[in-house]
Amino acid sequence: MAREKEGGFTVIELMLFLGITGALFAALMVGVSSNIIQQQYKDTVSTYANFLQNQYSEVLNTRNERDYNWNCKPDGSVAPSVGVDNGEARGTTPCVLLGRYIQVNEKGKVVHTGSVVGREPSSSSATSDIDVLKSYSPQITNFEVADNSFDINTVLQRPNKEVSTMSALILRSPVSGLIRVFVSEEPFPVKISDMITVENAGRTVKGCVVGETGSIPTMSVAVDSRIAGPSGVAIDQTDEVCNG
């Protein structure tokens, strides 16, 4: 009685199977890796936008973060006193918290923020919020009170591909109580009050968040100074200017 021939794979069939399986697995891994990179990029953009929006919240919900007394200088700047019992205690200093500042530097990779203070003028005839804020001689705090920074983990560029140096002031008028926003493509001037202009109160500054690979469409985060709230920060997921 003849034995039935046992079936099986030939060496060529086995090699073809392994080759096709390996190619499919490699394609799958490339797709997974691409999705991970895209998601990480979107998370970076979202986190950056949220960081900016939080600066508005800090001004809208004013709180005095200092844990020591101030020495309020004539130019409106402040410095920490030596010891909590020295300097001017809360409620007794002519210096007041006006709001927050935002500055992009370190070649477009880091965003710094912190408090803006000013000194109440002895007399002023200013009526508009812009003139009032100028009369307080606003200064960026020269000590670590609420200063913090956000590492973008990539590069922030202007639409013309230059590295972003965006700066912004989010201030509350001591007279009207209204929030005013001033933005610029340039770093802060030496005299901070020079930043407080009608032009800067009507600008929109856009930052293109550059991804790690050219296959990811570049998204942008824009700050519209005409909107005095977190909604003034907007994300554009398909910005034609940034992708031009």
Image: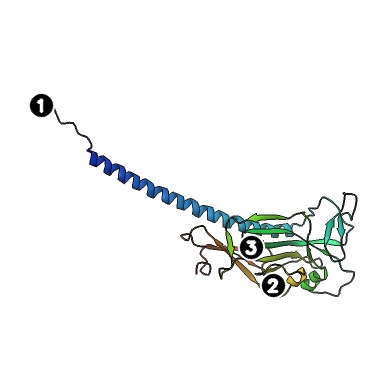
Crowd class of label 2 (few under 14; some 14 to 19; many from 20; radius 10 Å): many
Instruction: Indicate the quadrant where residue 125 lies.
Output: bottom right
Instruction: Tell me, for residue 200, which label it has, or none.
Output: 2
Q: Residue at x 27, y 44 (%)?
A: 16
The amino acid at mark 3 is Ser
Check disc 3 and report the residue beneath it. Answer: 231
Q: Amino acid at mark 1?
A: Ala
Residue drawn at 88 percent across, 56 percent down: 91
Q: Sequence-wise, which precedes: disc 1 or disc 2?
A: 1
> Measured along the vertical axis of the image, is residue 151 above or below residue 189?
above
Residue carrying label 1: 2
Please tell me which residue is depicted at 79% across the width and 73% down the height of the picture: 131
Dot 3 surroundings within 10 Å: few (below 14), some, or many (20 or more)?
A: few
Query: Nearest the camera: 227 or 208?
Result: 208
Q: Is residue 67 left or right of residue 184?
A: right
Judge from the rendering whether residue 170 lies leftward or rightward of residue 93; answer left or right. left
Who's the residue at 69% across and 72% down the image? Answer: 200
- Across and down, in percent, residue 228 comes to 69, 65
